[in-house]
C-alpha cells in the first residue's frame, strides 16, 4: 500500500497543474508579476532541505505552507511540529525570525513554567491570530500530566494542527546553509508578487469531514469542531496557493489528511490501527503495542467507549466482558477506511 507521503509526492512530482475535483480559491489580490513558476520554487526548496539537512521533501513543503500569509480577515492554520532536536531546527528558527519577527516557539519549555506566565504568553499569541505561527514540540512521545490544564495552554492546542517530522539528530551542512534556507523560503512565500492569497476553503470532501469528527474524539484537545474545520480548510488553501494552484486538488486533500493523522497522539493512533486491522483486541495487550502505561491505554479505551466507537462483546450469561474490545458496527467501516488510507473524496 502506498504511504501518505508517497501519495503526496506522486501528485506533486507529476506536474503543477490543476486537478478539477476541487473548487476555485477566491482571488484576493491582483497579480503584480506574471510567469513565476511557484511550483518550481517549492521544489527547489524541498530538494535543498533534503540535501543539506536530511529532511523529507514532503515535510518541508508542509512546514513552508504553514508560513504562508493569508488574505485579510482570514486566520492561517497554526502548526506544531513534533520532532527530535537537530541542527535543522536552528536554521528554521532563524528563518521564522526573519519572516515573522518571532522565534520558533519551544512548547516543552512552555509546559513547565508558571501558569500566569503561560496565560500571558498565550494571550499575546492569540492577539496575532491572523499571522502565521510555528511551534516545535520535542517531548511528545509520552502523555502529558494535567498540570498544564490550569492555564491557557489547551486554548493554544485547540487552534493548532500537528505534524510529525523525522530529522537527523546530527547532520553536517555546508557553511551558509541556514541563510540559503531562509532565502529559499522567502522566495517561495513572496506575498508581494503572488496573484492569489489563501482564504478559508469551506467545502471539504466528506471523507475529511468525517476525519474531523473523528479527530475531536481521538484528540480531546481539538474539542472545537468549528476551529478544527477552519484550520483544515485553510491549510488546504495555503498548500494549494503555495504551489501556484487556484483550485484545490487531490494533492491538497492528501496534505490535509497527513495533518489529521499526525494531530492524533501516536499511542492513540496505534490503538485505533490495531482495532481497525484485527477486529477485536485483547484489552490487557493494548498497552504493549500502544507503547504507553496500562492506565493510559485504559483511558484511551474509556474515551472511545464513551464516544460509542468501541464495544465489549457479551459473554454467555449476557454480561459484558472487558477482556476483548472491538469497533462498533456504526464506526467500524469508516474508521477502517480512514486508517488504511483508502480515501474516496467525493
Image (cartoon, rainbow, N blue to C red):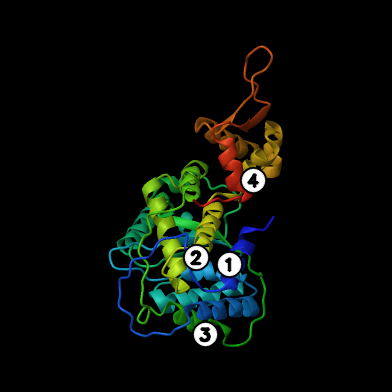
Q: How far from the left and from the top, in percent, is residue 153?
A: 42, 52
Q: Which mark is residue 179?
A: 3
Q: Which quadrant of the structure image shows residue 9?
A: bottom right
The span from disc 4 to disc 1 (Cα, nearest Å) is 27 Å
Q: Which residue is mark 4?
A: 270
First in sequence: mark 3 vs mark 4: 3
Q: Which mark is residue 11?
A: 1
Residue at image coords 61%, 59%: 4
* In front of the other: 258 or 219: 258
Label 2 close to label 1 by CB (< 8 Å): yes
Q: How far from the left and from the top, in percent, is residue 251?
A: 53, 63
Q: Is residue 33 visible?
A: yes
Q: How far from the left and from the top, in percent, is residue 232?
A: 44, 56
Badge 1: residue crowd in 10 Å (few <14, some 14–19, many ≥20): some
Q: Residue furthest top?
A: 317
Q: Which quadrant of the structure image shows residue 309?
A: top right
The secondary structure type at the circle numbered 4 is: helix
Relative to 217, does residue 95 appear above or below in the rendering? below
Q: How far from the left and from the top, in percent, is residue 243?
A: 48, 73
The span from disc 3 to disc 1 (Cα, nearest Å) is 29 Å
The secondary structure type at the circle numbered 3 is: helix
* In front of the other: 38 or 221: 38
Q: Which mark is residue 38?
A: none
Disc 3 or disc 4, which is closer to the eye?
4
First in sequence: mark 2 vs mark 1: 1
* In front of the other: 100 or 61: 61
Q: Is residue 112 visible?
A: no
The span from disc 4 to disc 2 (Cα, nearest Å) is 33 Å
Amino acid at each position: 500500500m502506498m504511504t501518505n507521503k508517497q501519495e503526496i509526492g506522486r501528485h506533486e512530482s507529476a506536474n503543477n497543474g490543476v486537478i478539477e475535483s476541487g473548487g476555485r480559491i477566491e482571488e484576493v489580490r491582483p497579480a503584480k508579476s506574471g510567469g513565476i513558476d511557484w511550483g518550481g520554487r517549492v521544489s527547489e526548496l524541498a530538494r535543498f532541505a533534503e540535501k543539506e539537512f536530511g529532511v523529507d521533501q514532503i515535510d518541508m513543503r508542509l512546514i513552508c505552507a504553514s508560513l504562508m500569509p493569508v488574505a485579510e480577515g482570514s486566520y492561517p492554520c497554526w502548526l506544531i511540529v513534533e520532532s527530535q532536536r537537530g541542527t535543522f531546527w536552528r536554521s528554521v528558527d532563524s528563518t521564522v525570525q526573519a519572516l515573522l519577527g518571532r522565534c520558533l516557539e519551544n512548547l516543552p519549555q512552555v509546559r513547565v513554567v508558571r501558569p500566569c506566565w503561560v496565560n500571558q504568553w498565550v494571550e499575546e499569541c492569540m492577539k496575532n491570530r491572523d499571522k502565521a505561527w510555528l511551534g516545535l514540540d520535542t517531548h511528545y512521545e509520552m502523555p502529558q500530566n494535567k498540570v498544564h490544564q490550569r492555564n491557557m495552554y489547551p486554548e493554544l492546542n485547540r487552534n493548532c494542527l500537528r505534524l510529525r517530522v523525522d530529522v537527523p539528530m546530527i547532520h553536517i551542512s555546508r557553511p551558509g546553509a541556514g541563510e540559503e534556507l531562509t532565502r529559499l523560503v522567502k522566495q517561495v512565500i513572496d506575498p508581494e508578487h503572488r496573484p492569489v492569497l489563501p482564504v478559508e476553503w469551506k467545502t471539504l470532501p466528506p471523507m475529511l469531514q468525517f476525519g474531523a469528527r473523528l479527530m475531536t474524539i481521538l484528540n480531546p484537545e481539538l474539542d472545537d469542531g468549528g476551529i478544527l474545520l477552519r484550520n483544515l480548510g485553510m491549510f488546504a488553501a495555503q498548500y494549494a496557493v503555495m504551489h501556484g494552484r487556484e483550485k484545490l486538488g487531490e494533492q491538497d486533500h492528501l496534505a490535509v489528511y497527513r495533518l489529521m493523522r499526525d494531530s492524533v497522539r501516536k499511542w492513540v493512533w496505534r490503538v485505533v490501527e490495531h482495532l481497525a486491522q484485527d477486529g477485536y483486541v485483547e484489552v490487557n495487550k493494548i498497552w504493549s503495542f500502544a507503547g504507553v502505561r496500562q492506565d493510559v491505554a485504559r483511558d484511551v479505551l474509556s474515551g472511545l467507549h464513551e464516544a460509542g466507537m468501541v464495544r465489549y462483546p457479551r459473554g454467555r450469561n449476557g454480561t459484558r466482558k472487558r477482556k476483548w474490545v472491538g469497533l462498533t458496527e456504526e464506526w467500524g467501516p469508516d474508521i477502517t477506511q480512514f486508517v488504511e488510507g483508502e480515501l474516496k473524496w467525493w
